[in-house]
Image: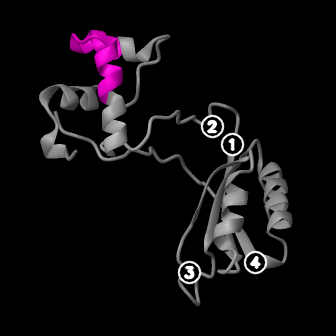
Amino acid sequence: MLHDTLDATDRAIVLATQEGLPLAPRPYHAVAESLGLAPEEVMGRMEKLLAAGVIRRIGAVPNHYALGYKANGMTVWDVDDARVSELGRRVGALDFVSHSYRRPRHLPQWPYNLFAMVHGKDRTEVEEKARAIAVLLGDACRGHEILYSSRILKKTGLRFGG
């Protein structure tokens, strides 16, 4: 299912939800009401759009600052290429890592190939969590850095026009 094959109802649902679901006890019902649709139709169509890849995911995006996490550090790691996939999965499974991914190195300036985002109440907490990642990585890790956020950037995906 491609963008140009969406019918008017699918397109209206995407437009109504692309900024996020309403903060309501029954968000799909609220979307349905705003569009004059049955809640079951909205949920069914969104499920099909998700399965077709038109919608990549439905999930919560917390505001870490509002939750008291003032230090946000992207930890970057120089990990043995033969083990980066396996170790990256283990790092990503840690409860204090919000997301992790593999990226290409850009030698000689940038030797890092594994990234893991860590949030903490302060930099000391982020550094403690980075030490725990270093222990997990063990001998496969040749070095790392912590890149701290200096400002909040609003993250958005592709948006349809009205």
Q: Which residue is mark 4?
A: 143
Q: Dots 1 and 4: beta carbons under 8 Å?
A: no
Q: Which residue is mark 2?
A: 65
Residue 87 is left or right of residue 66, and the answer is right
Q: Dots 3 and 4: beta carbons under 8 Å?
A: no
How much space separates mark 1 and mark 2, taking CA atoms? Answer: 5 Å
Please name the amino acid that badge 3 sits on.
Answer: Arg
The image shows residue 4 at horizontal and vertical percentages of: 13, 45
How much space separates mark 1 and mark 3, taking CA atoms? Answer: 29 Å
Residue 80 is left or right of residue 100, and the answer is right
Our reading of the magenta stretch's main secondary structure is helix
Please name the amino acid that badge 1 sits on.
Answer: Lys
The image shows residue 78 at horizontal and vertical percentages of: 69, 77
Sequence order check, earlier mark of 1 and 4 = 1
Q: Answer above or below: position of 42 versus 62.
A: above
Q: Which residue is mark 1?
A: 70
Please name the amino acid that badge 4 sits on.
Answer: Gly
Question: Is disc 4 placed on a helix, strand or loop?
Answer: strand
**Residue 146 appears in the picture as rendered:** no
Residue found 21% across the figure and 30% down from its top: 10
The image shows residue 50 at horizontal and vertical percentages of: 36, 38
Mark 1, Cα crowd under 10 Å, few <14 / some 14-19 / many 20+, is: some
Q: Which residues are magenta?
A: 30-45
Question: Is disc 3 placed on a helix, strand or loop?
Answer: loop
> Which is closer to the viewer, label 2 or label 3?
3
User: Can you say which quadrant of the picture contains the N terminus?
Assistant: top left
